[in-house]
Amino acid sequence: MANRIVVKNLEAGYGSVQVLHGVSVEVNDGETVVLLGTNGNGKSTLIKCIMGILPHTGGELYLEIDGERVDLAGKAPEEIVNLGVALVPEGRRLFPMLTVEENLLLGAYRPDARKDIDRNLAFCFEAFPILEERKHQLAGSMSGGEQQMLAVARALMSAPRILLVDEPSVGLAPIFVSRVIQKIQELKEKYNLTVLMAEQNFNQAVKIADRGYIIVHGQIEFEGKDTDELRENEMVKKFYLGV
Amino acid sequence: MFSFELFINALVAGLLLGGFYAAFSLGLSLSFGLLDVVNIAHPAFIIFGSYLTFYVNENFGVDPILAGLLFAVPFYFLGVAVYRIYYNVFEKTGAESLRGLVFFFGIFFLIEVLLIITFGVDYRLVRAPYIGKTFHIGSLGVAWRLFVPFLVGTALTIGLYQFLSKTFFGKAVMGVAQDSLAVRLMGADPIRIKTIAFGIGIATATLAGSLLIIIGPVEPAIGREYIGRVFAITVLGGLGSMSGVFLAALIIGVAESFTASFIGPSWALAVSFGILLICLAVRPAGLFGR
Ligand SMILES: Nc1ncnc2c1ncn2[C@@H]1O[C@H](COP(=O)(O)OP(=O)(O)O)[C@@H](O)[C@H]1O
Ligand SMILES: [Mg+2]
């Protein structure tokens, strides 16, 4: 059954500063959509709105979970997580003083995730063998790349239907970026996820994206129906490909 | 004079005392170490528990341990109420550090004054068949009034340890002070988690209070003697580690017992802090901290 994200003319900001000016984004069932934008253009702000971390001040924001429409206005992050939405947040936000394994198990906190915990844990360890090796190590003592893998794995432990990923490439060596991006794709296929990924690393993002949006100053400046359209876009050429 | 027998007696007395100190400190380690709530009123809640135990023991002959268990339920709700107030007035507005400390100091003295008004300043004690009796292992005499608190303290440690490490809720308690937004992203409400966990910490206080009054007579201001010691144990154990608190409590118990036997009782607390300072210099996270 279909799981979708629908954002229509969304307005949001911090205090008196408006950041999103009528943003419309849709992610259809089983798609991987990339939200491209350089620093400070509102990618994280949009993700925070979808997650209920930041209230929106205008427009419409709803999900379709198993084909059923769920309005997100006024919902708390924990309620949205319990609908089956997982976020790999900006800055990873692991529990640094908990072990890798404890972080993963906390990922399965929501009741719907607990019944599949063994299967999901086994799958996370299969996808990221380093996490199994390091399972008794404190999350805060791992390298950036390992932490990003843990953040992705922890999000999957909640057995999501919709996955939001905020700039998985930040602070990682290129080799780790490729690996993390690749894994997100594999996991998406395995669990039939609907994925929205904020990125500014164009070349990495298009490896797995079906299509994408370019956000500039809190507005969607371009919508690419596939990755070729994105690649041909002048803005992308200028800002992301250095042409 | 040093004698082997005196040594063993001091060691055993220290270990038993340590088990009781653990019961005394666990609730504080939970709130201070895991929830980031500096509940310096914890010893006062414990003395409050001692007096409730005294009251039902004196008037209805209720066993002190049973009394501690029964009062744990209303104390849980008392803890929930205290945290709710603390959260709404201080934590929510980000004013928790100094003003929160004043809040808990206020509760400390409020409880003390209420106890003085209600019960007076005299020492109170409880009666139970095991208090005053001693059993012997060889030439070693073990007082039940120390042995029972040791057992209960051990059981409480094991219970809290299992609760924190084996349940989802317990893991969320361990994570909530590290990153409360991340806890929300796991699908849990951090305020609810902190409220329940704080309630559990206060619930342990009645049991510790029963143990305190089993060990010896209690007067309303006796909590002051314990403030320094429980903080020393909590920090030495590594903030938030229940097994660490237990081991640190045994170490402090034994150290104090040896000091009292071989140097003089008035040195006991100084030795606790000496150990704490040396430990913090060498291992800032505490002996058993992560
Ligand atoms: N917590 C905040 N308070 C105030 N302004 C913020 C906050 N977070 C982000 N902003 C501002 O909102 C704009 C968009 O930020 P953000 O959504 O984080 O961008 P991106 O994720 O695309 O880098 C920026 O101008 C930033 O300065
Ligand atoms: Mg961002």
Image (tube, grey):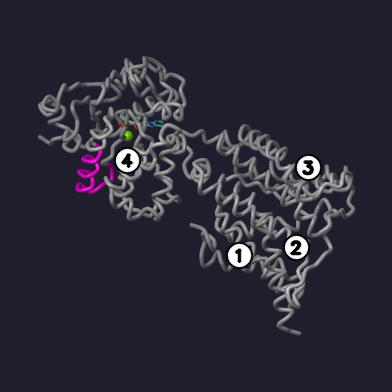
Q: Secondary structure at mark 2?
A: helix
Query: Few, some or many C-alpha atoms within 10 Å of disc 3 (few <14, some 14-19, many ≥20)?
Result: some
- Classify A67 as above or below A31: above
- Real-space Cα separation, disc 4 to disc 3, in angstroms: 49 Å
- Classify A240 as above or below A222: below
**Mark 3 touches mark 2? (CB < 8 Å):** no
The residue at which mark 2 appears reads as: B146
Q: Nearer the viewer, mark 4 or mark 3?
A: 4
Nearer-the-camera pick, A235 or B84 = B84
Q: Residue at x 19, y 21 (%)?
A: A223
The disc, 3 or 1, on the residue closer to the chain's N-terminal end is 3
The disc, 2 or 1, on the residue closer to the chain's N-terminal end is 2
The residue at which mark 3 appears reads as: B110
The residue at which mark 4 appears reads as: A152
Nearer-the-camera pick, B147 or B221 = B147
**Mark 4 touches mark 2? (CB < 8 Å):** no
Numbered label attached to residue B276? 1
Q: Nearer the viewer, mark 4 or mark 2?
A: 2
Q: Residue at x 64, y 54 (%)?
A: B155
Magenta residue span: A170-184
- Real-space Cα separation, disc 3 to disc 1, in angstroms: 29 Å
Query: Few, some or many C-alpha atoms within 10 Å of disc 2 (few <14, some 14-19, many ≥20)?
Result: many
Q: Amino acid under label 3?
A: Leu
Numbered label attached to residue B178? none
Looking at the picture, do discs 4 and 2 lie on one chain?
no
The answer to whether residue B18 is left or right of residue A183 is right
